[in-house]
Amino acid sequence: MIKEYCNILKNYYSVIHKDKKKLYPYYAGYICNIIVELIIPICVANITEKLTGSYFVAAIVCVFLLLFLNVLNSLLSFIDMHFYAKFFKANYISLYKQVINKIYDFDEEYKKTFSTGKLLNSLTSDVVNIGEMADNILTISLNIIKWFIILIYFSKISIVLALGVMLLNVVYITLSNYLNNKSVSNYLEQRKHNDSLISLINQTLLGLKDVKTMNFSSDLNKKYNAIYKKWGQAYFDKRRFYIYRVTFLKIMLELIKCAIYIYCIIAITKDNMSIGTLLLIISYYTSFFSASSTIMSCAASMKEENVSLVRIKEILDYGQNIQYENKIIKDIEGVIEFRNVSFSYNEKKLLKNISFTINSNKITAIIGENGSGKTTILNLILRLYFPSKGSIYLDNKNILNIKLDSYLNNISVLNQDTYLFNLSIRDNFNLINKDKRVQERICKLVGIDKFIKNLPKGYNTVISENSTNISGGQKRLLSLARTLMKDSKILLFDEITSSLDMDITKQVINVLNKLKENHTIIIVTHKKELMDIADETIKLCK
């Protein structure tokens, strides 16, 4: 059990290393508060002792001391909560930034290992859970210290009492840990089903039109119901073991407390113990097992939070073993070369030992049957996939040895399935280039400026989710304009004229002919009119 918690602590501090200094004031305040909480029962016992001895003035002094300690306890709690809130805020934002930035680095293969539901769950529940972990770690640590202080006091009264309490605590901790492990194993199942639920909800939203028009909501609900059932069973089983811990084990502790009362009463009748000592023993016994209960509650929470920690760490650790030279490139010529490149997908070999050179200031068309690997070549150039054999070079530099940001700054792409954000047209363009004059010049170049200005809000028109308020052709031209706003040397186009009529296609062809004067242009296409304008053609075969 100790080894398990040490591993959790190691993982936790490796994840929050940027913010752990913000915990120090919180730790200091919490330690002071524990000391005050241990002094309060002594003060209460002293009041009783003074009253039974008719020392009324001394009793009143102790009452004021008790008031001071309780006020101090509240003030320290306020300070604790204040510093913890500051830490939580900083850590929450920091983890979000780390996860989002790491997602940007995912290659296509790694991205497929995460469901949408798991990623969304990690960015909501998991980040919050990790933020709460610090409180549980400190609570466990300081309550363990409280154990030892109370045991020292008990040993001064009676070694038998101290050993009995310690033995009982071992039994309590062992049983609690067993129930915690059972509870957490069901919590893990619950999270998996929750991932599935969020993923299915996301798919339902994306495919809502098909769900409605093809009227299969009842069959889809069966899938939802199956997830509900599994989630509900996992939740109930998790809760059942929690209930066992907080009810049956509590009964055991109350029975032992009753026995200690009887032991103390007998000692008082024999003049071996004062009433004040009895109150202090009972108070410390309650405090001791309250500490044990708190520790096991926090331990249960930590184990559940460790599920989140493992999930987040899995994302943050991505790419740590990939070591490249990270060279910076500037003023490139734009010559791309494949040298004996092979690539397989799902054990199916798409590319086998291919070599070719794509020259600058030319249009190179990549053609071939569906499934021959045309789009795969673009994905390899974009470093979304990695060759299983061979290498790809840019101006005689292995692209894997170029710093990713520096490399991608020199490449702009129009994917076959482009995505416009649920933002205004202007804001979509601002993601690439904030110069309004450049935006409007390029929109005129591709032939979309007039359409935009005829919209009710012009460039400030908001594009709906999945671009449902514009046509496929309009979306394609907006995406093309956004691609050209990046002003990169190398331009990649995957089915650039998809959804465009012949007149617009001719306009796009004119744009490509102008661009090739100072760009490396690669087009994946199956349209003859685009093949005809290519200076060089690479034909792929299955």
Image (cartoon, rainbow, N blue to C red):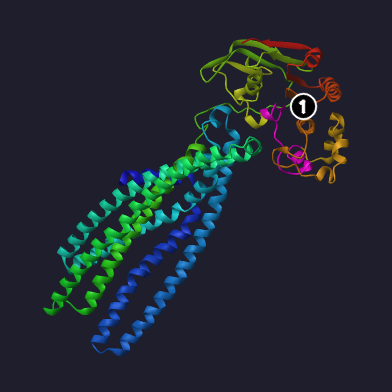
Residue named by callout 1 = 499
Point out residue 55 in the picture as x, y percentages from the top left corner: 27, 89
* Magenta-drawn stretch contains 431: yes
Between residue 352 and residue 241, name the one nearer to us: 241
Tell me which corner region of the image, top left, top right, bottom left or bottom right, holds residue 330. top right
Give the residue drawn at x 80%, y 44%. Answer: 461
* Magenta-drawn stretch contains 243: no
Name the residue at the left extreme: 270
Relative to 318, is 184 above or below? below
Q: Is residue 141 left or right of residue 52?
A: right
Q: Is residue 492 left or right of residue 172?
A: right
Relative to 71, is 34 above or below? above
Q: Is residue 309 left or right of residue 97?
A: left
Amino acid of disc 1: Ser
Relative to 185, is 499 above or below? above
Q: Is residue 190 left or right of residue 111?
A: left
Q: Secondary structure at mark 1?
A: loop
Point out residue 462 in the picture as x, y percentages from the top left corner: 76, 44
Give the residue drawn at x 56%, y 48%. Answer: 94
Tell me which corner region of the image, top left, top right, bottom left or bottom right, holds residue 211. top right
Give the residue drawn at x 18%, y 60%. Answer: 163
